[in-house]
Image (spheres, rainbow, N blue to C red):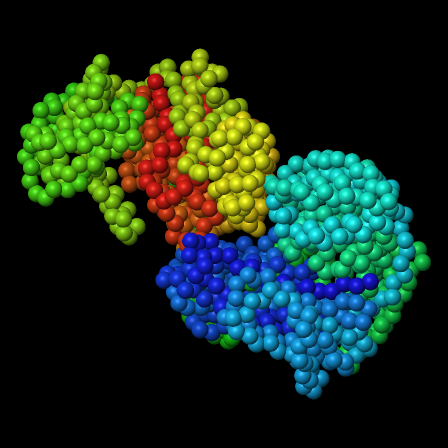
């Protein structure tokens, strides 16, 4: 038997158009080997050649059973060590400090055994340094050597590369090779050492360290701590091979999801080739596991010939997300499951099986604990092809598994790991705690509970003590690995261990803060270098008070009072009477139908938006009165003309009544023309030009502008409270059925007699690949999509756009398949998952949407928006009580004060959600919620805008039938609307409420001003929720999700029409 350890190097990602300007400029790797333990330290220098601050993300996959135990970054020119923190708290603290433009560091473990850190800022023409360290056990390279192999996969040359390998305590000289060439080794006392230093180095070679297996390698190492004696025992076992009954039928499950394209399928096919040759004749049923679970075909292998099956496996198109919930194990003699173990769109659970399941992976980003547990509980085996050679892997398929059955009864030995039932290889290690410094330890092994074999070792702490590495931390790592097999059950114990020993776990991270006051403020124990100062400040009570946590529950009363006061006003709009044109006392200008110019001042550029009753009026003419100066408006109804203050502009179009208005101090105007049949209305709105520089200045300018309106209009249209109204929404994709007690209006083609309809029109962004898909037949679309994907694999917008294309073409199955790829693009990326959630909800893929919403809550448990998304998705799944409870949790969710701008204000929206939900679902138990909050606050129109990007400024604008625009700077309108708080750095949402709707059109727009972050998970995705009350009191809901392809303003989202 033979297996060996592979060390992985990190993957650097810079998501920016100038990504090539950030590079790994220096790499220093130190490998220290003591006995069969290797401690690897990787020091990475990242240089920014750009002229602005840049950001990078580092993904660090590690081998099975290994976790990061050291993380450090440079702070003010010095390296600072990280300290452990609860994963959720780490995110909260990191983001709170980041909002102050300070640069903390956070290293997290994401799905599988992958570790991720964000490096920000990397200043122009400067470098940032990151250090990551981890311990791992060495296993056999062959019968004579332990092996450690490090594979680097960088494609660019590094300015400077340094490698140092030291082997402590070996009596025989190790062999160290780089790309097959032996490296010179020197000996200093009991340490063998080798070094490599190269400039402009391309590190795509292989470093291999082979250490002779001799009696000099300690069998047992130990350390004492508080009268407890931690030991680590490594045994080289000469195991007997016992052949198993060979299968006559095999269920071959092959993961075909997008992430599986990164597996090393060459290794997997080589293993199958060797296995089928040994089996000679066997029946194989092939199943594809991915977004769906499908039986592909049956194959009969004769005389080891499996060429037909191999051909299918070699031509797979890996596509879509992963749903293990779809799997059903076939009734075969055994199951071979090739996968990375990551179920991105369902719970990671496999069905029970009476047949042995062999889980096999070649992926470096696999969930090893999941794969190991599911194999072990069925009597199969987990085979990690990154750490075992083909021969060892084949043995695990051909022979029975030798199992560890624990330690023979000895009450002075406690907490020994790994767990009973663990498969045993030729090198096997156990760690535990002895209550005595000297002890005899008897290990038990066997193929079943009968005929157990004993292996004895003698613990002698005095002679076996070692100082070079922490035996206690090795024991902690083994315990954590054992607990992670059943993570949900052991989450609390795992967190406790991770925080105590500084080991990253699924719920424990490592954090670095810049200032001692931040450690005090957020109650985080600092590294040793700051501990004395930290304790002194704490003792003398000179520190600021600990950071106060806030929750939206604290503000619920004031927000409810605001809603209630607004609603009780019960504003009913009454149309104004006709007003004759008159002098404007303020600036002596006149608004009317026969105005005389009085030009003064400099010529300036005037923007005029021309509409009619249906929207923009392209081709309309704009002329400066009494001159030959004129222009026509574009397809979007916007025209530009040069004029002076005091000039009169004439707006006209064939078949419409011309309108005139005088230029005042403002530069932007909106005019609505009436046709010749019924001249009733002209609305002119003027507002100031926005400052494109500083965001705060722009906000102030818009607030000033919101108070400027042309009040002396010629006439108003017939607008009044709706009695028997008909409503249509344009520019939306509606949901064609009833969801969660909220009525969703079907396509108007099939419901033309419905007095209230939702008119839909597809969203069709201008993308070259969509134009290509438009040109082929329905049958050819999927094949063309796969071709187009080759240059768009990492582009979230590509999958979003193409999925919409398939959906609009009536191919829901492929639409969901393509969309599901978004879940495979990055590990634990909540922004990608939010965009996925929006479209899944819109398409009523409710079960899948619920899984996505639950994952987001796990990753972002400190965000009220996450719980609101979960609540609405639970409601879609008819889990009404759970939905209500999630809304209450959203209000109770704590956050640091620095994040108020991101979270405070959502109370307005959640209160309306609670109010609607209680009114719709009568059986909801409101629990501790005060009765006054349950009093019904019905509205005719409710519009909510959500988006997926953090630190993004997106605004909701509603243009009402009167022409008045309601948005963050103009929160109350004449017809009685109410607008919620403006979110400029979070995800929103922003909300528009109208108690008493009037007849006419309501245009829904968004202004997208951009992000403050340097990286993004694709462009911002927005989802609009529209709730409209019917005459019978029922609520119609429509959802629409689009991606804002670039930073721009006045993006039309939808139009509601009430007739």
User: Is residue 887 visible in this depiction of the protein?
Assistant: no
Residue visible at 26% across and 24% down in the picture? 612
Q: Position of residue 167 (x, y in %)?
A: 69, 77
Q: Residue drawn at (10%, 44%), measured in percent from left and top?
A: 602
Q: Position of residue 730 (x, y in %)?
A: 39, 26
Q: Is residue 419 above or below residue 722?
A: below
Q: Is residue 421 left or right of residue 147?
A: right
Q: Residue placed farthest to the bottom in the image?
A: 189
Point out the image quarter for the N terminus: bottom right
Residue 66 in the image: x percent, y percent?
67, 62
| Relative to 260, 932 lies left or right | left
Q: What is the quadrant of residue 911 in the picture?
A: top left
x 60%, y 40%: residue: 320
Which residue is nearer to you in this view: 248 or 893?
248
Q: Is residue 418 visible?
A: yes
For the C terminus, give its image quadrant. top left
In this rendering, position of residue 934 left or right of residue 245:
left
**Does 539 sit above or below residue 239?**
below
């Amino acid at each position: 038997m033979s297996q060996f350890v592979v060390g992985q190097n990190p993957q650097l990602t810079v998501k920016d158009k100038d990504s090539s300007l950030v590079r790994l400029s220096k790499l220093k790797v130190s490998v220290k080997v003591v006995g069969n333990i290797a401690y690897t330290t990787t020091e990475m220098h990242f240089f920014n050649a750009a002229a602005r601050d840049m950001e990078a993300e580092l993904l660090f996959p590690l081998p099975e059973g290994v976790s990061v135990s050291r993380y450090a970054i440079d702070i003010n020119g010095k390296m600072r060590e990280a300290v452990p923190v609860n994963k959720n708290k780490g995110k909260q603290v990191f983001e709170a400090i980041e909002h102050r433009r300070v640069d903390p560091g956070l290293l997290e473990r994401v799905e599988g055994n992958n570790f991720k850190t964000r490096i920000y800022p990397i200043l122009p023409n400067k470098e940032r340094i990151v250090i990551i360290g981890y311990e791992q056990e060495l296993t056999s390279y062959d019968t004579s050597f332990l092996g450690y192999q490090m594979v680097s996969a960088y494609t660019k040359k590094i300015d400077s590369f340094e490698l140092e390998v030291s082997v402590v305590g070996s009596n025989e000289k190790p062999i160290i090779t780089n790309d097959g060439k032996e490296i010179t080794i020197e000996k200093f006392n009991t340490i063998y050492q080798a070094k490599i230093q190269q400039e402009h180095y391309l590190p795509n070679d292989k470093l291999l360290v082979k250490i002779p297996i001799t009696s000099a390698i300690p069998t047992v190492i130990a350390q004492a701590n508080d009268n407890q004696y931690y030991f680590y025992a490594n045994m080289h076992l000469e195991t007997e091979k016992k052949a198993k009954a060979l299968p006559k039928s095999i269920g071959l499950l092959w993961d075909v999801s997008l992430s599986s394209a990164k597996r090393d399928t060459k290794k997997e096919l080589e293993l199958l080739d060797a296995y089928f040759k040994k089996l000679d004749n066997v029946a194989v049923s092939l199943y594809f596991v991915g977004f769906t679970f499908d039986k592909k075909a049956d194959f009969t292998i004769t005389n080891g010939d499996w060429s037909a099956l191999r051909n299918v496996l070699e031509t797979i198109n890996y596509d879509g997300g992963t749903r293990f919930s779809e799997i059903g194990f076939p009734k075969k003699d055994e199951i071979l499951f090739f996968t990375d173990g990551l179920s991105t769109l369902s719970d990671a659970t496999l069905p029970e099986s009476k047949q042995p399941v062999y889980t096999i992976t070649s992926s470096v980003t696999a969930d090893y604990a999941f794969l190991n547990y599911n194999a072990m509980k069925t009597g199969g085996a987990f085979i990690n092809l990154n750490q075992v050679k083909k021969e060892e892997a084949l043995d695990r398929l051909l022979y029975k598994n030798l199992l560890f059955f624990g330690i023979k009864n000895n009450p002075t030995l406690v907490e020994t790991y790994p767990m009973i039932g663990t498969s045993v290889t030729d090198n096997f290690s156990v760690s535990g705690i002895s209550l005595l410094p000297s002890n005899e330890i008897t290990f038990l092994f066997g193929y079943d509970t009968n005929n157990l074999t004993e292996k004895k070792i003698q613990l002698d702490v005095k002679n076996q003590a070692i100082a070079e590495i922490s035996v206690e931390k090795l024991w902690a790592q083994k315990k954590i690995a054992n607990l992670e097999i059943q993570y949900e059950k052991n989450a609390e114990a795992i967190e406790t261990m991770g925080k105590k020993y500084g080991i990253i776990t699924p719920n424990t991270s490592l954090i670095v803060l810049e200032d001692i006051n931040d450690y005090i403020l957020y109650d985080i124990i600092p590294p040793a270098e700051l501990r004395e100062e930290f304790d002194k400040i704490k003792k003398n009570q000179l520190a600021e008070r600990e950071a106060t946590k806030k929750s939206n529950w604290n503000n619920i009363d004031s927000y409810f009072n605001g809603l209630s006061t607004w609603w009780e006003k019960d504003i009913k709009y009454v149309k104004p009477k006709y007003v004759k044109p008159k002098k404007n006392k303020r600036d002596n200008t006149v608004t009317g139908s026969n105005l005389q110019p009085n030009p003064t001042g400099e010529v300036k550029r005037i923007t005029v938006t021309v509409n009619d009753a249906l929207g923009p009026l392209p081709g309309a003419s704009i002329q400066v009165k009494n001159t030959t100066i004129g222009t026509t408006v574009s397809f979007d109804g916007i025209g530009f003309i040069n004029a002076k203050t005091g000039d009169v502009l004439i707006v006209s179009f064939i078949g419409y009544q011309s309108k005139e208005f005088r230029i005042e101090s403002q530069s932007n105007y909106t005019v609505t023309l009436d046709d010749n049949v019924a001249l009733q209305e002209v609305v002119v709105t003027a507002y100031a030009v926005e400052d494109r520089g500083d965001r705060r200045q722009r906000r102030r300018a818009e607030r000033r502008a919101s108070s400027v309106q042309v009040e002396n209009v010629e006439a108003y249209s017939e607008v009044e409270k709706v009695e028997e109204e008909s409503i249509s929404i344009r520019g939306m994709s509606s949901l064609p059925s009833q969801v969660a007690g909220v009525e969703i209006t079907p396509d108007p083609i099939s419901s033309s007699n419905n007095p209230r309809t939702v008119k839909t029109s597809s969203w069709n962004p201008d993308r070259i690949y969509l134009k290509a898909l438009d040109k082929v037949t329905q049958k050819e679309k999927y094949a063309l999509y796969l071709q187009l994907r080759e240059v768009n694999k990492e582009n979230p917008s590509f999958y979003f756009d193409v999925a919409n294309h398939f959906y609009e073409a009536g191919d829901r199955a492929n639409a969901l398949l393509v969309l599901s790829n978004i879940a495979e693009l990055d590990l634990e990326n909540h922004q990608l998952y939010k965009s996925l959630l929006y479209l899944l909800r819109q398409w009523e893929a409710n079960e899948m949407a619920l899984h996505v919403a639950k994952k987001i809550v796990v990753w972002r448990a400190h965000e009220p928006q996450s719980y609101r998304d979960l609540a609405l998705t639970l409601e879609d799944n008819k889990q009404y009580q759970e939905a209500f409870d999630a809304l209450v949790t959203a209000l109770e969710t704590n956050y640091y004060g620095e994040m108020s701008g991101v979270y405070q204000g959502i109370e307005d929206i959640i209160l309306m959600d609670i109010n609607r939900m209680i009114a719709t679902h009568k059986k909801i138990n409101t629990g501790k919620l005060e009765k006054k909050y349950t009093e019904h606050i019905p509205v005719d129109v409710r519009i909510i805008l959500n988006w997926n990007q953090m630190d993004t400024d997106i605004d909701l604008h509603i243009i009402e039938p009167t022409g008045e625009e309601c948005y963050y700077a103009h929160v109350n309108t004449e017809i009685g609307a109410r607008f919620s708080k403006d979110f400029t750095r979070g995800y929103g949402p922003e909300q528009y409420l109208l108690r008493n709707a009037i007849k006419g059109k309501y245009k829904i727009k968004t202004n997208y001003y951009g992000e403050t972050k340097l990286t993004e998970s694709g462009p911002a995705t927005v989802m609009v929720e529209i709730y409209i009350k019917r005459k019978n009191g029922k609520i119609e809901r429509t959802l629409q999700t689009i991606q804002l392809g670039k930073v721009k303003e006045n993006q039309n989202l939808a139009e509601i029409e009430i007739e």
